[in-house]
Image (cartoon, rainbow, N blue to C red):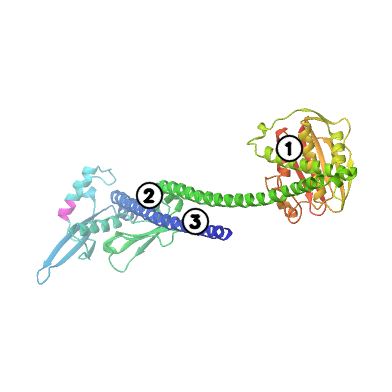
Amino acid sequence: MEKRIKTLYIVTIIAILAFLGMQVYWLYGQYEYALSDYEQNLSERIIKCVDDYNSIRAKSHDTRVDSLKEKGNNADVFSVPTFSLKQEYGDTIKTTRTSKIYTYLFSAHELLGLKPGTPLTEEQQRRAMDIAQVQMATPVDSMVFDASGARDEGQAWLATSNVLTEQKCPFSVEGIDTILQKSGIKSQIDLVEADSMVWNTTVKYHTSVFNPDLTMIIPYSELQGKTVCIVSPINPFNVLPGMWQTLVVTLSVSVLLIICLVLQFSTVLKLSRLDKMRNSFITTMIHELKRPISTLKMCISGLDNKQMVDDPEIRKELLSETRTALDNLSAYFSKLRDITFNNVEQIPLNIQNVNLRQLFHNISGAIAIPSDKSVTFTNDIDDSVTVPADPSHMFNILTNLVENAIKYSGTDVEIHACATTGRAGYIEIHISDNGTGIAPDDRRRIFDRFYRGKNSYGDIPGMGLGLAYVKLLINAHGGEISVDSNVGEGSCFTISLPR
C-alpha cells in the first residue's frame, strides 16, 4: 500500500507540473497573440501621428520666407511641382516617372501694386501667385527626382508634395515627439537619411517577451531618402488587460484542478492512515483485552480449585485480581463508549462541587503501582479549591494522567499536583512528572484518537485512547488541556476548567 501511495504521490506531482507547464505554454501563446495585436494597434497610432504631423507641416508658414526677409529681400517663395510619366513598350512595359520642383521668388506687393508692408489677405496672396506663375521665367532653384520606384502615380505625386513640405517646414524630432506624447506614446526618435529613396514603412516587431519594443522606420520625404526611426518600448502590463478574461478563466480552472488533485491525494492519504489506525487499534485492543480476560480465566480456574478456595489469603487475592480485571474491562469499554460520541454535548454529566485535593488523594491511594517502580505523590492542591464537575469523569481524567506518568517514567517516579487561578473564571490543574517526556512532533498529536507517540512503542500497553478520552471529557466540561514537555525531563499537563 505504501508503495502504491508513493507512486500515486509522484504521479500526482508529475501531473500537476505537466498541467502547469501546458498552461504556461498556452498562456505564452495567448500573450504573444495579445502582444502582436497591441503592436499592430500601436503601429497604426504611430503612423497616424506622423500623418497628422505632416499635415500640420504642410499647412504651416513657409520658413524660407522668413529667411529671405531676414536677408532684406521683400519677396515670397513660390514652388511649382510638375510630374511627367513616360512608358516604353517592349517585351515588358517600362515606366519612368519624373518629379520636378521649381522654386521662384516674387514680391506680392509689387505684383499687386501695393505699398510694402501692407497686410495681405488670403485672396490677395492667391492672386499674386497666379500673376507670378504667368510672369515667371527663370526659377531660383530646381530639383529633379526619378520617381520610377513609386508604386503608382498617386504615390509619386504624394512623394513630390512631401518634398515641398520638407522645404517649407523641415521635419523635427521635437515636433513629432510632441504629437506622440499627446497620444500617450513614449518613444526614442532619430532622423535618418538613406543613400537611396525609401518608399515603404518598415516595422520591426518585438524580439524579447519581457522587454518588448516596436521599431518603425517611416519615410517623410521619400524622394530625398529622409526617414524617421521611432522606437517605442512596450510595457507588458499594458498588454495583459487585453487578455484579462483569458487569465481569469485559466487561473480559475488551474486552481480548481490543482485543488481537486491535491484533495484527491489527501483523501487517499487519510484513508490510508485510517486503515493503518484501524488495523493498529484492532491489534492493540485485542492485545489489551487479552490481559484482563487471561486474568479472569486464571482466577476462575483458581476458584474451581477447592484447596485454593479454602485458603482465605489465596481466595482474597483471587477476588482482588478478579475485581481489578473487571475494572480494567469496564474502563476500556467506558472509553470506547465515550470516544464514539459525535460531539461533547452528548456526554451525560452529573455536575457537583468536586474537592480537587481530596480527589487527587483518593487517586494516589487507589492507583495500581507496578512492583518494579517507586512512586512519590506530592499533593500541593489547597483544600479549599473546588470545581463544578462530574466526579466520576474527573476521577477518570486525573487517573489517566497519573497512569501515563507512571507508565512513561523510570523506576523512581515523582508526580506533583497543584492548582492555581488561571484567567478570569477558570481553575488550572497542573499534573507534572519526571518521566521520559514527549517529543515535539508527538505533542501536536497526542490528543488524537488512536495515536501513540514514539515512546509508546515496544512493550508499553495502550490503545491510543487515553489522552483523547481525557481531552473529550475536559471539553465536555467546557475546559481545555495543554502539555508542556521536554524529552528526558518530564511533562506537565495543564487542565483549565470553569469555576
Does 345 appear above or below 95? Answer: above
Q: Are marks 2 and 3 in contact (CB under 8 Å)?
A: no
- Which disc number belongs to residue 16? 3
Does 89 appear above or below 240? Answer: below
Quarter of the image with the C terminus is top right
- Which disc number belongs to residue 417? none
Residue 64, x across and y down, in percent: 31, 55
Counting residues from the start of the chain, the first of labels 1 and 2 encountered is: 2
Q: Quadrant of residue 170?
A: bottom left
Residue 203, x across and y down, in percent: 34, 60
The majority secondary structure of the magenta stretch comes to: helix
Magenta stretch containing residue 189, yes or no?
A: no
SS class of the residue under badge 1? strand
Q: Quadrant of residue 225?
A: bottom left
Residue 141, x across and y down, in percent: 24, 62
Q: Nearer the viewer, residue 40 or 56?
A: 40
Residue 93, x across and y down, in percent: 12, 68
Residue pointed to by mark 2: 179
Marks 3, 1: nearer the viewer: 1
Residue 326 visible in rendering: yes
Q: Is residue 314 left or right of residue 18?
A: right
Type of amino acid under label 2: Ile
SS class of the residue under badge 3? helix
Type of amino acid under label 1: Glu
Counting residues from the start of the chain, the first of labels 2 and 3 encountered is: 3
The number of callouts visible is 3
Q: Residues within 10 Å of mark 2 (few under 14, many from 20)?
A: some
Q: CA distance from mark 3 to mark 1?
A: 41 Å
Residue pointed to by mark 1: 480
Region rendered in magenta: 131-135
Q: Nearer the viewer, residue 134 or 381?
A: 381
Marks 2, 3: nearer the viewer: 3
